[in-house]
Image: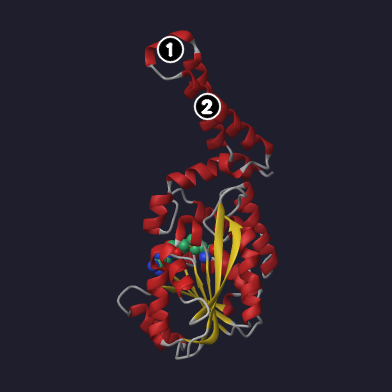
């Protein structure tokens, strides 16, 4: 572990240490009676604090007890609103990747990103379990034109680029301009800037982004081979409908959707179930929420059969 990684463990060590100290103090007969905090609660605080400290010290921590994960939970509402967790981890990731990944090497960029998420700070990226599911779906579709909704730091863009031939192009739409800038730096460092265009905007902005995709990037009826939905989970269905209304899909186009179980896109899942065997054929891929193995998630891979 390098010095920077060690420094990153301090917030977790301090938080865990504070829980142990506070919980232990409360376990004394005097304070417990005065504060009214039940003994079992103090024991839980001591155990949790101890686990967090042990976790941060081992170097291969259990994700749920990592400070980075707990901080992500705290920042989840900020993330839903802005697209960033709020503690600067996205910018830190870009700097880490540029400093540690071999330039021009997509494989090494992905490896470095996974290392950052496993040992440093977890990102809200598709991750190393669902990432290969995405890559397999992309490779099987043999796409030339891909649309991603939700670029974030460019991690899934790297994985999709790795799974496609060099003449395929990914257009990735991201509503947070700072994220778009981070993703562009990451993608350029990995040597695939000529294969990915990051577009700042959102399909639901009243038509501006749809228009730019048409006018500036050549989106036309039947031209889109694959869509990856990984943005606002409440917008999956609405934005897919915008894509369908634009006529960009063709029979055989594939739509992959992440986080269908957690945070969840129930309306989207119900829509695909309703049209199963008709307009769409869907395969559900069971997986887990990124960078841990306890909470289950689902990736949906849906083939369009309409005309
Ligand atoms: C879960 S992250 C995407 C992760 C990325 N696909 C990866 O695996 O590396 C979601 C991203 O979607 C962006 N976002 C949220 N709502 C959006 C919208 N309506 N249009 C475009 N981007 C959106 C957020 O700013 C955030 O960067």
Position of residue 166 measured from the top left corner of the image (x, y, whole percent): 65, 82
The outermost residue toward the top is: 30
Position of residue 16 measured from the top left corner of the image (x, y, whole percent): 54, 31
Determine the secondary structure under disc 1.
helix
**Other-residue count near label 2 (Cα within 10 Å), few / some / many at <14 / 14–19 / ≥20:** some
Quarter of the N terminus within the rendering: top right
Instruction: Give how far apart the Cα atoms at labels 2 and 1 are.
Output: 16 Å
Q: Which residue is mark 2?
A: 44
Q: Is residue 75 visible?
A: yes
Contact between labelled residues 1 and 2, with CB atoms less than 8 Å apart: no
Disc 2 or 1, which lies upstream in sequence? 1
Q: Taking 12 as reference, is 28 above or below it?
A: above
Looking at the rendering, which quadrant does residue 17 occupy? Answer: top right
Residue visible at 65% across and 35% down?
57
Q: Nearer the viewer, residue 68 or 143?
A: 143
Q: Which residue is mark 1?
A: 31
Residue visible at 45% across and 65% down?
231
Q: Taking 293 as reference, is 103 above or below it?
A: below
Position of residue 23 measured from the top left corner of the image (x, y, whole percent): 50, 21
Looking at the rendering, which quadrant does residue 6 occupy? Answer: top right
Position of residue 30 measured from the top left corner of the image (x, y, whole percent): 44, 8
Q: Is residue 100 left or right of residue 290?
A: right
Q: Is residue 301 left or right of residue 35?
A: right
Tell us which disc is closer to us: 2 or 1. 2
Q: Is residue 175 visible?
A: no
Q: Is residue 212 left or right of residue 163?
A: left
Q: Nearer the viewer, residue 271 or 74?
A: 271
The outermost residue toward the left is: 206
Determine the secondary structure under disc 2.
helix
Residue visible at 46% across and 89% down?
218
């Amino acid at each position: 572990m390098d010095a920077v990684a060690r420094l990153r463990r301090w917030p977790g060590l301090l938080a865990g240490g504070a829980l142990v100290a506070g919980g232990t103090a409360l376990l004394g007969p005097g304070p417990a009676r005065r504060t009214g905090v039940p003994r079992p609660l103090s024991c839980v605080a001591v155990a949790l604090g101890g686990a967090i400290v042990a976790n941060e010290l081992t170097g291969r921590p259990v994700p749920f007890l990592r400070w980075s994960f707990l901080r992500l939970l705290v920042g989840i509402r900020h993330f839903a609103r802005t697209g960033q967790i709020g503690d600067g981890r996205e910018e830190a990731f870009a700097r880490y990747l540029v400093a540690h990944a071999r330039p021009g090497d997509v494989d090494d960029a992905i490896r470095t990103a996974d290392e950052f998420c496993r040992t440093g700070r977890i990102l809200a990226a598709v991750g190393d379990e669902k990432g290969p599911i995405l890559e397999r779906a992309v490779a099987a579709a043999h796409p030339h034109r891909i649309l991603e909704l939700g670029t974030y730091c460019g991690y899934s863009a790297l994985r999709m680029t790795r799974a496609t031939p060099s003449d395929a192009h990914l257009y990735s739409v991201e509503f947070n301009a700072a994220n778009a800038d981070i993703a562009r730096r990451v993608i350029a460092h990995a040597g695939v800037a000529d294969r990915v265009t990051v577009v700042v905007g959102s399909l639901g902005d009243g038509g501006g982004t749809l228009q730019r995709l048409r006018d500036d990037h050549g989106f036309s009826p039947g031209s889109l081979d694959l869509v990856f939905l990984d943005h606002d989970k409440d917008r999956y269905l609405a934005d897919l409908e915008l894509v369908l209304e634009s006529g960009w899909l063709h029979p055989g186009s594939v739509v992959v959707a992440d986080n269908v179980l957690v945070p969840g896109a129930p309306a989207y899942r119900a829509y695909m179930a309703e049209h199963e065997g008709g307009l769409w054929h869907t395969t559900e891929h069971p997986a887990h929420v990124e960078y841990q193995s306890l909470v289950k998630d689902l990736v949906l891979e849906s083939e369009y059969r309409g005309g």
